[in-house]
Amino acid sequence: MTEFSLITKKGLRDGDPVPMALLTELKLNTLFCGNTLKILSHPCGAEDILARQEIFRILEKDIRAKEQFTLLYKKLAQFSKTFDRYNKSDNDCVRLFVFRECVACFFSLIDADLPAGSYFCGRLSAYFAELKKKSGEMQNTFAEYAALLDKISGSRIVFSPSGYYLAEDTGGGQKSVLDLIVRDADALGWGRDRTDDDKKITFVSPFSKYLNALYPESFDKLTQLERSLYDGIDFNLLSLISEMDFYFEVSELIKKADRQNIPHTYPTPAENPSFSADELYDITLISAKAEKIVPNNVFISPEKRCFYICGANGGGKTTYLRAVASQLIMFLGGCPIFCRSAMIYTYTKVFGHFPQDEDSAYYGRLDREINAVSEIIGKCDDESFVFLNETFSGGTQSKATELALSAMDQLSEKGSCCLFVTHLYDVYKSAYPVLSPVVANDLLHTRTYQIGLSDKPGGSYAGDILKKYDLDEKSLGDDS
């Protein structure tokens, strides 16, 4: 991520970004727009995580600061819109007039009242102060530029959000050449589309040629001043829009979660590769309008870094995986995460593999899965977290088990953390701990949609068997 940014202290880390395909698989795209996803795809270090958390806290608690951020965002949006119109201008006259609005938007932007009290706000204020200092040298140039525009148009070209118009002179007095052109605009076929205000005529490009012919020296001078002013404008400020999108979108998600009594916290960065959380939620289920979102406890430590997740379908395995992965990515982006409390390591790399829909045709699927996982393992180190969901399910039971065990061994040797959802029961025989859906201690073994440690296969399947055959626990007893 090489573009201008005020969000980071040390610059974004090198290395592979989190793939957009993984963010989509985790359903983060149902919560956030492209700008926010782009920011989340680049993990931060501990210092930057804390700096970003600081601004989220301010937006939560300081109403005045949020109002100032909102006003800044509106000014940025107006600057962006005007600059876009400038780039799309189809003739010299329109371009020069739009540029006046562009410069005015820039001056208004850097005069914005900025919030204080955080690293980001302090850095932004300092940056804007430097821009204001430099802009002082532009003021005289801009005054000359605006005066020339008024001279060639007689202040008759009017700017509005929907475009430019020629303002008709309803007064008496002697008419200039320009007045006569405006008066005859309808006859020339230029004023077909009148505005609600009948004193305005739609501006059309032929008018630019007349002005240029009337004031050639003024147009040449305007072009020179345009270049000078353009060089003084910091258009990099437009990249702040994506940063504001990021802050506001995550802040809105906090509000939605609060309305559903889902807590959020600002995790402390852990010293060693680990992920511990109390009552962690899969917050992406908010977009699915789930009636009830069940939280899970998570404890991944340097000693126990790799886990299989195995059990009955529909028991919450993938939801658990998605909760950990999505909240890890949000934490690494400096966001609050949705749980009671947490401590998470600042992993530098996050990888994942989810079988694609187009892979439902078994031909070649296993080879693709083997290649994808091999590529991931090749990039992993002891600061990586890997999420695998039903990987190698395109092979036979024995082959898939062999591949699943081998992949976990390689990731473990590299010191990586891994959660691996699988239907392969033989993983219980491996050296790695297994998580599985926890069932209630009742006759039907009701699913709780929570995940916990398991030391034997099949426990989470009992309820399914009883329901399927309309049996009770006594029916499964030994009748010998």
Image (tube, grey):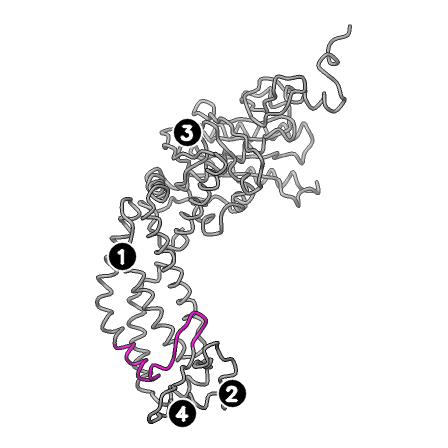
Horizontal side, residue 413 vs residue 361: left or right = left
Q: x, y percentage for residue 299?
A: 46, 25
Q: x, y percentage for residue 205?
A: 46, 82
Give the label on residue 31, or none: none
The answer for how far apart the CA atoms under marks 2 and 3 are is: 69 Å
Give the label on residue 341, or none: 3
The answer for how far apart the CA atoms under marks 1 and 3 are is: 37 Å
In terms of sequence position, does the residue under pointer 1 or pointer 3 come before the other?
A: 1
Determine which residue is flagged by label 1: 128
Residue at 25%, 77% (x, y): give it: 144
Circle 1 SS class: helix
Determine which residue is flagged by label 4: 180
Horizontal side, residue 199 vs residue 154: left or right = right
In terms of sequence position, does the residue under pointer 3 or pointer 4 come before the other?
A: 4
Residue at 47%, 36% (x, y): give it: 327
Give the label on residue 189, or none: 2
Choose top left, top right, bottom left or bottom right for residue 155: bottom left
Question: Label 4 is placed on what type of residue?
Answer: Leu
In terms of sequence position, does the residue under pointer 4 or pointer 2 come before the other?
A: 4
The answer for how far apart the CA atoms under marks 3 and 4 are is: 74 Å
Span colored in magenta: 144-164
In terms of sequence position, does the residue under pointer 1 or pointer 4 come before the other?
A: 1
Residue 371 higher or lower than 67, as above or below = above
Q: Residues within 10 Å of mark 3 (few under 14, many from 20)?
A: some
Q: Residues within 10 Å of mark 1 (few under 14, many from 20)?
A: some
Q: x, y percentage for residue 441?
A: 61, 17
Question: Label 1 is placed on what type of residue?
Answer: Phe
Circle 2 SS class: loop
What residue occupies the far top of the structure in this picture?
Answer: 480
Residue 95 higher or lower than 48, as above or below = below
